[in-house]
Amino acid sequence: MSILKKSIIASAALALPLAVSANSKLEKMMKDPSQWVQQSGDYAGHRYTTLDQINKSNVGSLKVAWTFSTGVLRGHEGGPLVIGDTMYVHTAIPNIVYALDLNDDQRIIWKYNPVKGGKYPGGETMDRVISVMCCDNVNRGVNYHPNGTIVLHAADTSVIALDAKTGKEKWITTNLHAGTGKYGVSASTGSGQPFIIKDTVGVGCSGAEFGVRCNWTSYDINSGKRLWRAYSMGPDKDMLVDPNKTTSMLKPIGKDSSLKTWPGDAWKIGGGSIWGFYGYDSKLNTLYYGTGNPSTWNPVVRPGDNKWSMTINARNPDNGMAKWLYQMTPYDEWDYDGVNEMILVDMKVKGKNRQALVHFDRNGFAYTMDRASGELLVAEKYDPAVNWATHVDMKTGRPQVQDRYSTAHQGEDVNTTNICPAALGSKDQQPAAYDRLSGLFMVPTNHVCMDYEPFKVDYVAGNAYVGATLSMYPAPGGTHLGNMIAWDADKGKIVWSNPEPFSVWSGAMATAGGITFYGTLEGYAKAVESKTGKELFKFKTPSGIIGNFMSYKHKGKQYVGILSGVGGWAGIGLAAGLTDPTAGLGAVGAYSALHNHTALGGVLTVFSLP
Amino acid sequence: MTKKTILTSLIASVFVAGKSIAMPTPDAVEPQFDENDDPTYYVTYGEGDRLDPSTEKPLNLIQIYCKEQAVDFASDEDMDECRANDDLVEMKYGWMDFSTYKGWRAYHAECHVCHGPDAMGSTYAPSLMMSVKNGLDYMDFYTIIANGKGVAEGAQEGNVMPAFGENTNVEPHINDIYRYVKARADGKIRRGVRLPKLPKFKE
C-alpha cells in the first residue's frame, strides 16, 4: 500500500522530473519478484521470476491455493497483475477488471465494467463490438503505472485509466472506431495490452480482417491527451519515419518506402494490426512492436511488399519516430502476422556480445536481431515442418518463398495445399519465456499446416474483409498439433521438444527454480524442467488455457497464477478437432476434438506449495 | 442411402500439380428444390477415385461411411469397429456442384471465424451442421444471417450473431451457404476441403 501512496504524491509533481522517476520506479518494481507489475513481468519480456521457493525438487507437490471465477465464459488471454497486496484480474468482453485483496482471502475491493447500459464508452453497443472482433472476445490484460493507475484497453478501442485503489475512472479516450459505415471507416477493435513507458501509455489496434489501417498511438498517462500516432503503412509523415535516418537491414529506407509497395491507395485499408506483446529498452529508449498482416488475405489484389505490414518496429517512445524496421514476410500470402512478442536479451551471438532482440514469428522463423542497430543476426525455422520458404537470405533479409506454397503464384480460386505453418503460425500471440539460468527460450508452439484458397471479395466499411478460405490439419507425419520447445537463439536450434496433442496456446514462465510453466488447451497447467523439458507437475484446471503464467510472493510464500478460459483462435480452429483431409478412415477421428476435453469458463487458478 | 449419379461424359480438364486431370460433366448445376421449396444440395458422384499425381492420394474422396453412417455422425464404438474391419467402410468419390462449392468458400471466408471449420462449431458459436441436422430450416437460416440475432435465450451475455444482410460477400451467397451446410448435415460431404469443384459452366 505504501507504494501506491507514494506514487499518488509523485503524480502531483511536475511533468519532467516525473517522467524520469516514474520510469525508474516501474523498472524498480519489475525487479521485485514479489510483484508482477506488467503483463510480461518486465520490459524485456523475459517472463522470468527470480523466486525459487517452488523449484524442480518440490514442484511435484504443488497444490491449488485458491481459485477465482471471472464470471465471463469466453477466451481469457493475458494474465493478472500483482501490485503490493492487490491483484488485478481482467476478463474477455465485457472487459471487467477486478481488484482482489490478497490480505483478505481475495475479497473483491472493486469491480469495474466499462459496458454501461449495453454500450462501451466509445458509444458502440457491446453486441456491435463483438460482431467486429475477429476470432473471439479476448483481451490481453491491463497494465499498471506507478502514479496509481490501472490502464485497460477495451474491445471498442477505448483506453481507460482507472484509479488503482478505487477503480474510479480517471480518464477515458476512445482510440479508434469500432463502428460501421456511418463513419465510412473500417471497424477497429482493441485486444492488445496497453503499454506503459515513462508517463505515457501506448496502444495498438486489431482489425486487419476488417480492412483497418492500424497504428500505434501514445497517450499522456495523466491527462489521456494524445501525443503521437504512427501508422503501419502510408505516407512517411503518417508512419513517423525519416527516409534518411530510419533504416531497414542497416540501410536508410528512402522516400515513400510504403506507398511504393501498394497498388494505388490499397494502403488505406492495408491492415498491419498491432496486438501482441511488446518490449522496451530504457537505456536505448526504444519501443519494440510488430505489425500484422496486410489486408485482404487475398494477395493477388495487392502486389508488392505491402510495407510496413509484417514488420518489427523499433521506435523512440517520446515522439514515435522509427529507428529501424525489419519486414519479416514481405507480400504476405498466408496471414503470418508479425505481432508476436519481442524478447530483449543481452547475449552472445556468434561469439560476439549483442544487445539482442529475439522474436518467434508466426511465419515459423525465429529471428535474433541486434536491437540497437536492427541488424539481422539469426533467422532459423523453429518447427522443422515449416515449408513455405526454404530459408531467409541473410543479405537481403528476405524469405525465399517456394512457388508451390505461394498462394499468389498459384493464384486466385486455386486451393494451395500442404502449406506449413497454418495461418495461426508456428506460434501465435502466446508469449515465450527466457530462462536466465540456461540461456534458453521456452517457446509454446503450434504444429499445424493448411490449405489456403484466396479469392476476390468486396471491401465494405465495417464488415469483415478476408478473402481466403482456410483448412487446417496436423503437420505431416504426426498426430499432435503442438510442441513445447526450448530454443537456442544463438545457434538457431531446438534443444528439446515436447509434443502436445493440441497447440500450446498459453504464455510460458521460466523460474529461478529451474522450471518452466505452461498451459495446454485441454486445461493442464504443467511444469517442466527448463534444461531438459522433463515433466514434473500437471494439474487440470477448469477450462482450456490460453492465458499467461505469472508469479508473486505474499507473506513469504511463492504463488503461481494462471487464467483458464478456452477460446481465441485456438477455440475456433480446434474445438471440433482437426482432420487430415487426405487420409482414409485410419486417421478420421484420430485427432480428438477439444470439446471432448474442456468447456468454456474464465477461472484464475493460483498454486503454492502446501 | 445415397442417390448415385452415373457420369456419362468427360469433357473438361483441370490442372493439378501441373498435370491435366479429366473432370466429369455435371449432370446438373441448377439448384434443386424440395417439396417446401427449400433449395437443396446436389452432389455429383464420380466413378472410382482420382489420384493427385503429386501425392498419389485420392483427390475427390467426398465422404467416408462407417456402418452406413457418415463418419461425422458415427459413434466412437462404431468407428473402432470400422477401423478394425474394412468391410464396414464405404468410400464415396465425387465433386461438389458449383453452388455447393461457392457455399463452402463463402462459409470458410466469413462464417468459420465464429462457427468453426467444416460447419462444426467453435468453443462459443454453435455448429451449423448440427443446427441444420436438428431442424433449422432454410427460411430461419436465411433470416438469421440477414438480420443477425441478439443474445440468444439461455446463452451467455456476449453471444451475438451480426447481421449480414448488407454484406455483399455474404448476402448473395446465402443459398449457396445453406446448400453447403445442408450437405454437411446430411452426411453427403466430409470434413476437409480438398474437394475439387466442378468447372463453371455458362448458364
Image (cartoon, coloured by chain):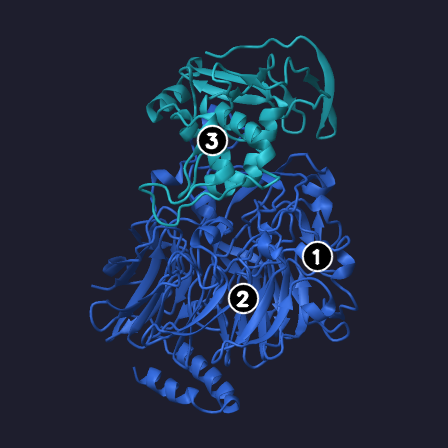
Chain colours: A blue, B cyan
Return the residue nearer the eye: A370 or B159: B159
Q: In the rendered view, would you say A129 is above or below B121?
A: below
| Mark 2 crowd level (few <14, some 14–19, many ≥20, 10 Å Cα) | many
**Residue A146 pos. (x, y %):** 41, 80
Asked which secondary structure carries label 1, the reply is helix
Residue under label 2: A175
Chain under disc 1 = A
Q: Position of residue A283 (x, y in %)?
A: 56, 82
Mark 3: amino acid? Phe
Q: Secondary structure at mark 3?
A: helix
Q: Nearer the viewer, residue A285 or A479?
A: A285
Q: Is residue A112 left or right of residue B42?
A: left
Q: Quarter holding the C terminus of chain A?
A: bottom left
Rate crowding at label 3 as few (under 14), some (14 to 19) or many (20 or more) other CA atoms within 10 Å: some
Q: Position of residue A244 (x, y in %)?
A: 77, 74
The disc labelled 2 sits on which kind of residue? Asn
Give the percent coordinates (x, y) of residue A205. 55, 61
In depth, the one of A321 and A115 nearer the eye is A115
**Chain at numbered mark 3:** B
Q: Residue at the spot x=61%, y=47% of the render?
A: A465
Rendered position, A482 above or below A202: above
Q: Which residue is mark 3?
A: B141
Label 1: which residue? A267
- Whether marks 2 and 1 lie on the same chain: yes
- Image-based side of A93 in relation to A197, left or right: left
Relative side of A273 to A430, left or right: right
